[in-house]
Image (cartoon, helix red, strand yellow):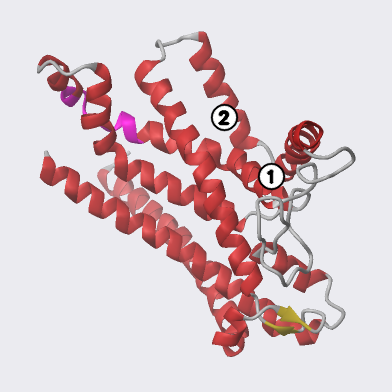
Amino acid sequence: MSLQSRKAVGTGLTWVTGLAAALVIGMLGFILVDVILGGWSRLSLQFLTQAPSEGMTEGGIFPAIYGTAVLTLLMTVAVLPVGVLTAVYLHEYAPKGGRLATLVRVAVQNLAGVPSIVFGLFGVGFFIQFMGRGLDRAVADPGALRWGQPSLVWAALTLAVLTLPVVIVSTEEALRAVPRDWRDASLALGATRSQTLARVILPSAVPGILTGAILAVARGAGEVAPILFTGVAYFLPDLPGSLTSQFMHLGYHVYVLATQSPDVEATRPLLYATVLVLLVLTFLLNLVAIVLRIRTRRAASGGH
């Protein structure tokens, strides 16, 4: 192939990839403009701080915002320690090619490919029927049903299982990015393996760990299918008061407004405004991930 032909091919590939990127940006821009135009007029302080009313054609979405925030917080508390510790074991302690490490990696890969609705069914079978009913038989009065029903804690644990592969993979990639020379230098200076992990490796990997954690949180906050059977409520103006309470959720509220409303035209502004709030929260989570990653990288670079 001549030089002129190679330049033509390179120019063509540049245009094709640029058009593909522009198409993605254009689709995102179209969605954002449509949502903003449809929901901006409905946004207000009352909409963000009041409970829904009048068959969900009036009022606000504060219970859904609160339920989404509490659910996401509980999910993060459950998934982050397990995911980080699993990644540390796989990368730092597990023998290369070991059977247990291979089995864990296969399990993580399979979990990442399972449809989200399957996690919801898993949550019903394992968390509610097995763990919840078992707790009721062990600690509750005979015939009482407290833990063995859909609730906030089981929905959070179901989402934790869903987002676990994201945390494990991102943490392992962050650990892999730490230079091998830093480990060798720490060990050569007399530090133990655990001291090297705690004082050298993990502080250097914090940016990647935080990024993976925030991305997992962003995904979990927008998931609806896993919580359909494990705790979310159709209409519940009251805020959840305990781990065994049911709750409202922004994603599920969008589904309800779009499919279950008796007056579609009346709920359309509420639907768009709810979607706008959910998108803003998701974008803010990703922005937090970017800012934390930049700051922690600068701090780590200054420290080294």
Badge 1 amino acid = Trp
For the record, the magenta segment spans 174-182
Q: Quadrant of residue 124?
A: top right
Q: Nearer the viewer, residue 53 or 24?
A: 53
Does residue 44 appear in this view? no
Q: Position of residue 46 (x, y in %)?
A: 59, 86
Q: What residue is drawn where x is 26% and y is 54%?
A: 294
**Pointer 1 residue:** 154
Q: Position of residue 11 (x, y in %)?
A: 34, 55
Q: What residue is drawn where x is 70% and y is 40%?
A: 119
**Pointer 2 residue:** 109
Q: Quadrant of residue 253?
A: bottom right
Image quadrant holding the N terminus, namely: top left
Does residue 124 appear in this view? yes
Q: Residues within 10 Å of mark 2 (few under 14, many from 20)?
A: few
Q: What residue is drawn where x is 52% and y is 9%?
A: 99
Query: Mark 2 falls on what kind of element?
Result: helix
Q: What residue is drawn where x is 41% and y is 21%?
A: 89
Task: Count up the numbered dots.
Answer: 2
Where 112 falls versus 68 (above or below)?
Answer: above
Residue 177 painted magenta: yes
Image quadrant holding the C terminus, namely: top left
Q: Position of residue 107 (x, y in %)?
A: 59, 25
Q: Position of residue 77 (x, y in %)?
A: 50, 45
Taking the image as shown, residue 209 lies to the left or right of residue 195, namely: right
Residue 242 painted magenta: no
Magenta span: helix, strand or loop, mainly?
A: helix
Taking the image as shown, residue 259 lies to the left or right of residue 211, namely: right
Badge 2 amino acid = Gln
Q: Nearer the viewer, residue 173 or 81?
A: 81
Q: Nearer the viewer, residue 171 or 6?
A: 171
Taking the image as shown, residue 122 lies to the left or right of residue 107, namely: right
